[in-house]
Amino acid sequence: MSSRVMRDFDLLLPESIEETIALLARHKDKSAVLAGGTDLLVALKFDYSIDNVISLALVPGLDELDFDPARGLTIGAKVTIADVLRSQDVKDNYPALWQAAQVFATPQLRNTATVLGNILRASPAGDCSAALYATGGSLLLKNAKGCRNIDLDDFWISYGVTARCVDELAISLHVPVPAQGEKSAFRRMTRTTEDLSKINAAVCLQMAGETCHKARVVMGCVGPTLLRLPKVEKMLAGAAVTPELLRDISNVVISEIAPIDDQRSSAEYRNKVAGVLVKRVIEAALNAKENDQ
Amino acid sequence: MKLLNLTINGRKHTKAVSPSMTLLDFLREELNLTGTKNGCDKGACGCCSVMIDDKPMLSCLLPALEAEGAAITTIEGIAKGNALHPVQEAMIEMGAIQCGFCTPAMVINGVHMLAKNNNPDDDEVKECISATVCRCTGYNSIEKALHLAASKMRRAAHDGS
């Protein structure tokens, strides 16, 4: 057998969303949902035991990756990072998400890992999560009582903890239609390319000429959850994005983050590079040509 | 135990497996297909790569039962009898195999890439092998082997047409 022996669990294979929800209602916190499983299986091998793993493998209706210019982007629970990377619609309309998918882990993991799994994992290092937090979006959750939508702004509570109730299944994520003049980008720093981010950042800017009307600026690995940087967003809103403004923003970033020392980096280093990374991700968003990459 | 049906290297298998058994352990322990290696067992080293329905995936991160109905290709299914695949030939010719532990995964990923694109550039080759850790070669010889395999495959395609 494997060197890492997983504690036995039962693998439940429901064949519909309704059946899945009924299983969640029955097993609640004695169960975990498996879509891609690239995080869950590692957890099950090392530090976590659960009686029932509810697999979505046979559940239809969760594969949708659909862009409608009038409604926006819908990402189903089983859509993988590789699916997102293959989508010309995502590349054209949500560059931050596409760029995050491009550097996400490794080709094999991208074929397995799901976008919604990245969100539900509630890691402050989630690359696709950071990009989606910047563009904004809402999750559709469903339990036996019905459906609710929850904004990503309200979803992550602390490290590994989300607003999802134990009996709720995440069905899909909805990302709004890009605003007029919207520009977005994602950048990160890692030790090696396949490693998790030691720090990452994503921005979504609504531009009219040189002026930024509205900004969402997100930074990861600098707090217990992904963080938005409200001071930076305020400095950008209504301002002409000049080199001077970018320099001022770069200096403010440190006051909005609370990084820690861990195996991937130190608080000191993260504090040092955070301002530079935010400046660079803003420049990347602004300098992207039409149909770039 | 639950019944699992799947096709491995073109051969159908039906076997009862434990729900908490990974596909990697199923291949190695139940079917004795030990070409697929267990490196880190947590999705970081890439050594357990297999093709599942034509996509390279990590077999250590997948319960075997998740592969119900799938068609799986392991390193044992790459050569045709005694005829090696061009990727395997090129790995030998370029000295890209040292201890050999990463080799099955390197070959699986190389075969997958070249089946789609037999004229990859340097970046595409690097991307292809980026997910598999090799502690011997320094990767250069593996990159050279994949370029050599690509040229062999282009020549074969040209001769065949």
Image (cartoon, coloured by chain):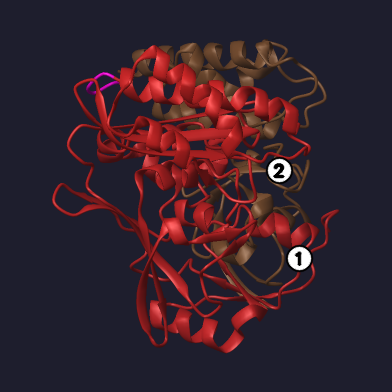
Residue drawn where x is 43% and y is 56% of the image: A153
Identify residue for label 2.
Answer: B36
Q: Which image quarter: residue A206?
A: top left
Residue stretch rendered in magenta on the structure: A289-293
Q: Is residue B60 visible?
A: yes
**Residue A123 locus on image (x, y percent):** 61, 51
Chain letter corresponding to the colour red:
A
In-front residue for pair A144/A235: A235
Residue drawn where x is 55% and y is 47% of the image: A226
- The image shows residue A61, relative to residue A123, as above or below, that is below
Calculate the distance from the C-alpha at mark 2 to the C-alpha at mark 1.
26 Å
**Which of the labelled discs sits on residue A48, or is there none?**
1
Task: Locate residue A275 relative to residue B93 in the image: left or right.
Answer: left
Bin the neighbour count of mark 2 within 10 Å (Cα to Cα): few under 14, some 14-19, many 20 and up.
Answer: many
Q: Quadrant of the N terminus of chain B?
A: bottom right
- The image shows residue B139, relative to residue B75, as above or below, that is above
What element does badge 1 sit on? Answer: loop
Q: Is residue A293 visible?
A: no
Task: Locate residue B75 relative to residue A260 in the image: left or right.
Answer: left
**Residue A64 locus on image (x, y percent):** 31, 58
Q: Which image quarter: residue A243?
A: top left
- The image shows residue A64, relative to residue B109, as above or below, that is below
What element does badge 2 sit on? Answer: loop
**Which of the labelled discs sits on residue A203, or is there none?**
none
* Host chain of mark 1: A
Going by the numbered disc 1, the residue's amino acid type is Tyr
Q: Chain B's shade in the image?
A: brown
Residue drawn where x is 70% and y is 53% of the image: B24
* Host chain of mark 2: B
Residue drawn where x is 46% and y is 56% of the image: A116
In-front residue for pair A197/B35: A197
